Image: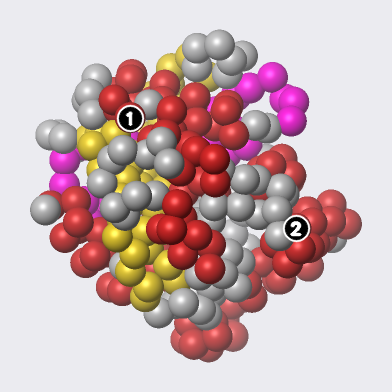
């Protein structure tokens, strides 16, 4: 784990960096972190893998105020620049896909290829606002019920059954990031549609057909807004691929290697 200051913000971003060769940056979503989100898949990639912790996760610090997309994007940019890898491939998941898209739009000089998994272009619609407001309110009122509801939305029914009773009980013992509430607050009412036309990097958008947290229509909106992007839709719930990566990783590895 290493760290670097974030220019123009009262923040220090901590990030994991391992391997050698070309850089790949993995950006997590709400409640996750560098280790928790990508621990099962980071070893599948070659080169230098860089995993920043966004504000609210890991040891990354900020001024404690309301999170902004600009701050999180600046943290990713700071980690890329501190890595010394020049132009990198950038993969964002969930909220991390939104942050990664914004980063690619702001700093095209830093992004060679862009991969957006389980992301969205906007959460301003009635269903998304209702859903993320419910997540936020559940977390504030009853964290254990929030974790149970979050698990139901995060994984497909088939994978939940595969976990079994003991596996599901164990999953509820996992800790969510301490700043999950702040990350959820940011997730209400996001809209990066005006930025999508500025993305110049070749882009792969991966939609998850059984996703209840961020429905696959979000990925379709990203694809529609990013000129020349490629869209693939694969089976699975929002976080299925982090447990069983076989549906997603082959598409990502083929795209990054092409």
Q: Position of residue 84 (x, y in %)?
A: 24, 20
Tell whether 213 sits left or right of 42. right
Tell whether 35 sits left or right of 47. right
Question: In the image, is residue 254 part of the stretch drawn in magenta?
Answer: no
User: What secondary structure predominates along the stretch shown in magenta?
Assistant: loop
Q: Which mark is drawn over residue 129?
A: 2
Query: Residue 146's image quarter?
Result: bottom right
Q: Which mark is drawn over residue 108?
A: 1
At x 45%, y 71%, the residue is 208
Q: Is residue 229 above or below residue 208?
A: above
Tell whether 41 sits left or right of 166. left
At x 31%, y 74%, the residue is 247
Q: Position of residue 40 (x, y in %)?
A: 35, 59
Query: Residue 57's image quarter?
Result: top right
At x 79%, y 56%, the residue is 133
Q: Which residues are magenta?
A: 43-66
Cα separation between marks 1 and 2: 30 Å
Residue 241 appearing in the image: yes
How many marks on residues? 2
The answer to which of marks 1 and 2 sits earlier in the sequence is: 1
Question: Under tag 2, what secondary structure?
Answer: helix
Query: Foreground residue, 221 or 85?
Result: 221
Instruction: Give the class, few, some or many, for how many residues have Cα within 10 Å of label 2's Cα (few <14, many ≥20).
Output: some
Query: Foreground residue, 224 or 42?
Result: 224
Q: Is residue 112 above or below residue 128?
A: above
């Amino acid at each position: 784990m290493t760290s670097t200051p974030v220019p123009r913000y009262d923040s220090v971003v901590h990030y994991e960096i391992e391997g050698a060769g070309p850089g790949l940056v993995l950006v997590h979503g709400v409640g996750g972190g560098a280790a928790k989100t990508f621990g099962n898949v980071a070893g599948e990639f070659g080169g230098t893998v860089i995993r920043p912790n966004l504000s609210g996760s890991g040891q990354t610090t900020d001024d404690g105020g309301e999170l902004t997309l600009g701050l999180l994007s600046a943290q990713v940019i700071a980690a890329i620049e501190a890595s010394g890898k020049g132009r990198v491939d950038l993969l964002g998941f969930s909220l991390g896909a939104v942050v990664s898209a914004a980063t690619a739009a702001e700093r095209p000089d830093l992004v060679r290829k862009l991969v957006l998994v389980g992301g969205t272009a906007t959460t301003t619609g009635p269903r998304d606002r209702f859903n993320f407001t419910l997540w936020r309110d559940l977390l504030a009122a009853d964290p254990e019920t929030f974790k149970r509801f979050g698990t139901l939305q995060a994984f497909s029914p088939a994978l939940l059954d595969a976990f079994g009773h003991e596996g599901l009980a164990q999953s509820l013992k996992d800790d969510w990031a301490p700043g999950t509430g702040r990350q959820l607050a940011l997730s209400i009412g996001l809209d990066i549609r005006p930025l999508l036309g500025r993305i110049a990097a070749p882009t792969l958008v991966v939609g998850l057909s059984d996703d209840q947290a961020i429905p696959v229509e979000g990925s379709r909106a990203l694809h529609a807004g990013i000129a020349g992007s490629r869209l693939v839709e694969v089976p699975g719930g929002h976080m299925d691929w982090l447990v069983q990566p076989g549906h997603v990783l082959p598409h990502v590895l083929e795209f990054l290697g092409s």
